[in-house]
Image: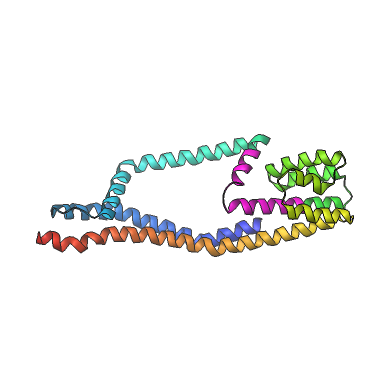
Amino acid sequence: MIEMKNAVGVAVAYPLVVLVCACLVVGFLTVYVVPVFADIFHDFGSRLPAPTRVCLAVCVFLRHHALSLAVALVLIVILLHGLRRVLRWTESGNFFLDSVVLHVPVVRRLFAAASLGRFSRSLGLLLASRAHVLDSMNLAAAAAGNAVLARSVRAAAQRVSDGTKMADALASTGYFPHSFCWLLGVGEDRGEADRALLDIADAYDRDVAGMEKLVKFLLAPVLVVAVGAVIAFVVLSLYLPLFTAGDAIAG
């Protein structure tokens, strides 16, 4: 998981630098260049094209509210960070935050796969060392780093204590995928639950590695395209009036 975060960080480093540079260039154009050009064009008595009017509106807004926006952004970041830290202190807060993550597209699949992999590997190693099943389930759930998964495992542990097979108990929670429970059930029937769990963990590790490659492959181009679209819009807003300047002067 740490290697994945580092790889993603390296992948987005270049587009983020491009994004920052593009924001600086766009900010300079909208604050200093576009208004001057607009004043000159207004002297012609001609109406500005729509993209240019949008740029001017953004420019005026930034000129009057840039400081307020910066302060508000810093305060929002600080408040969100503080709220996250406070919520992480409680079990219900952890459950809420992880529930939110599990509803975010793309991220939820990566988060779920990574936590299932950690749970499977931890539980498999604990069972292989002949640790008590219930203790192993609770310890593995804590190691998964997913409060939603941990709550489901605790509920399943209650059913296991009543004599239910571990695979059936986990399936009854509705959180664990069918393939996970089926493979674990086959391992339990053979008396090899620990080996089945380690095989499941390997499968999830491969799944996470594949998603990591996909993120690295797609994220950089998406950011670069987004930056290019912003720059293209600003350039278009600057050049559109030039295309009609001749008509304005002739009028």
Please state the horizontal and vertical placement of residue 183, each as a whole percent of the image.
Answer: 79, 56
Q: Image quadrant of residue 159?
A: top right
Taking the image as shown, residue 196 lies to the left or right of residue 79, namely right
The residue lying toward the viewer, choosing from 36 and 162, is 162
What residue is shown at x 13% (from left), y 55% (from top)? 44
Residue 179 appears in the picture as rendered? yes
Residue at 60 percent across and 58 percent down: it is 6
Against 59, is 10 above or below?
Answer: below
The answer to which quarter of the image holds residue 68 is top left
Principal SS element in the magenta part?
Answer: helix
Magenta residue check for 98: yes
Q: From the image, which quarter does the N terminus lie in?
A: bottom right
Region in magenta = 95-121
Residue displayed at 10% across by 62% down? 250
Residue 93: % across, % down: 63, 36
Question: Is residue 107 magenta-colored?
Answer: yes
